[in-house]
Image: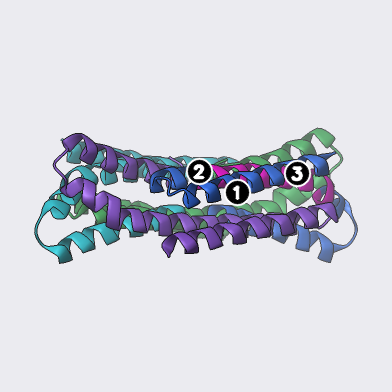
Chain colours: A blue, B purple, C cyan, D green
Amino acid sequence: MDKTDTLRRLRNVEGHLRGIERMVDEDAYCIDVIRQISAAQAALSRLNSRVLHEHLHSCLITAVRGEDPGERGRVVKEIGEVYEMASKV
Amino acid sequence: MDKTDTLRRLRNVEGHLRGIERMVDEDAYCIDVIRQISAAQAALSRLNSRVLHEHLHSCLITAVRGEDPGERGRVVKEIGEVYEMASKV
Amino acid sequence: MDKTDTLRRLRNVEGHLRGIERMVDEDAYCIDVIRQISAAQAALSRLNSRVLHEHLHSCLITAVRGEDPGERGRVVKEIGEVYEMASKV
Amino acid sequence: MDKTDTLRRLRNVEGHLRGIERMVDEDAYCIDVIRQISAAQAALSRLNSRVLHEHLHSCLITAVRGEDPGERGRVVKEIGEVYEMASKV
């Protein structure tokens, strides 16, 4: 179900990009292109946030409550990495 | 030519998103999905930056050097707006 | 006047940081520290946006309307650079 | 020790802001002010990333491995929130 929702959202952004390609092809005003690209990026940020939410409530909890310290360390480290990607450290 | 380059880059991101859809469909690891979505966003940021570069060197210069103060004000205001979008003020 | 406003805003963020130092010193909860640091960053983003606004309506217009193509090119290039900094390209 | 490091970094950014105040007071070029403010923001992002790192390896692990599901849910939810703040969803 969440997978269906993620796929639907990805396809929406894909459709949005095709719309932007048409705009560029028809020589739309640069600033309007930038605005549309920014809107597509914002949709991808919201999607990332949902994927992370699911991950935290399933994989992370399972790994941290599990008995493998290596696995636990790995999963926790990844959260730090995606946070840095989001804040572009 | 720049239009061709912009279109090629947009199609690349579109292809990237289709790849992410396949990953999601095949139950890829959430963190890998987030990493790929972040890479697609970074490609869109670089594209925005190129579109703005062209805009600054053509439309902005023409409008600011032109004799219509309304047009000049509008074009300058838009630069402030895309800057705020980029910094998510 | 705008200078006074910029200085006042910078001093506010400075005071905010001193408050965060006190929080850290008194062993505040990590997430609360992150929230306050994010709020200070948002205040700096708003300030950057105001400084850019003034710059666009004064220096940029003067340089672009001026007769030195080197100066015009330099000022336009800088706008591209601060945009890239804001979008962390 | 980590607390000492966090405090030292916060004081550095505070000192950086005071330097920017002097620049503004001496009528520095707007673009240079924007560059310095962006550098201060980047230092705060790196600091946030370190504070989160510590939090993940201590509080988060303790809460998720603990037996209080409410506490576990709260700590996991906060990670989603700081991620959204960083990506400005």
**Relative to A63, does residue A11 appear above or below in the rendering?**
above
**Relative to C81, does residue B59 appear above or below in the rendering?**
above
Q: Quadrant of the N terminus of chain D?
A: bottom right
Circle 1 SS class:
helix
Residue C23 horizontal/vertical position (percent): 50, 42
Tell me which chain the residue with mark 2 is part of. Answer: A
Query: Can residue D50 be seen?
Result: no
Which amino acid is tagged 3? Answer: Thr
> Disc 3 vs disc 2: which is toward the camera?
2
Q: Nearer the viewer, residue C89 or B50?
A: B50
Q: Are marks 1 and 3 in contact (CB under 8 Å)?
A: no
- Asked whether, in this view, residue B42 is left or right of residue C7, the answer is right
In the current view of this chain or complex, which residue is farthest to the right?
A67
The majority secondary structure of the magenta stretch comes to helix
Circle 2 SS class:
helix
Q: From mark 1 to mark 3, how far is it between C-alphas?
A: 19 Å
Q: From mark 3 to mark 2, how far is it between C-alphas?
A: 21 Å
Which residue is disc 2 drawn over?
A36
- Asked whether, in this view, residue B64 is left or right of residue D5, the answer is left
Residue A17: in magenta span: no
Residue C71 horizontal/vertical position (percent): 16, 62
**Residue A12 placement: quadrant:** top right
- Magenta range is A36-60
Tell me which chain the residue with mark 3 is part of. Answer: A
Callouts 1 and 3 in the same chain: yes
Which amino acid is tagged 2? Answer: Gln
Tell me which chain the residue with mark 1 is part of. Answer: A
Which residue is disc 3 drawn over?
A6
Circle 3 SS class:
helix
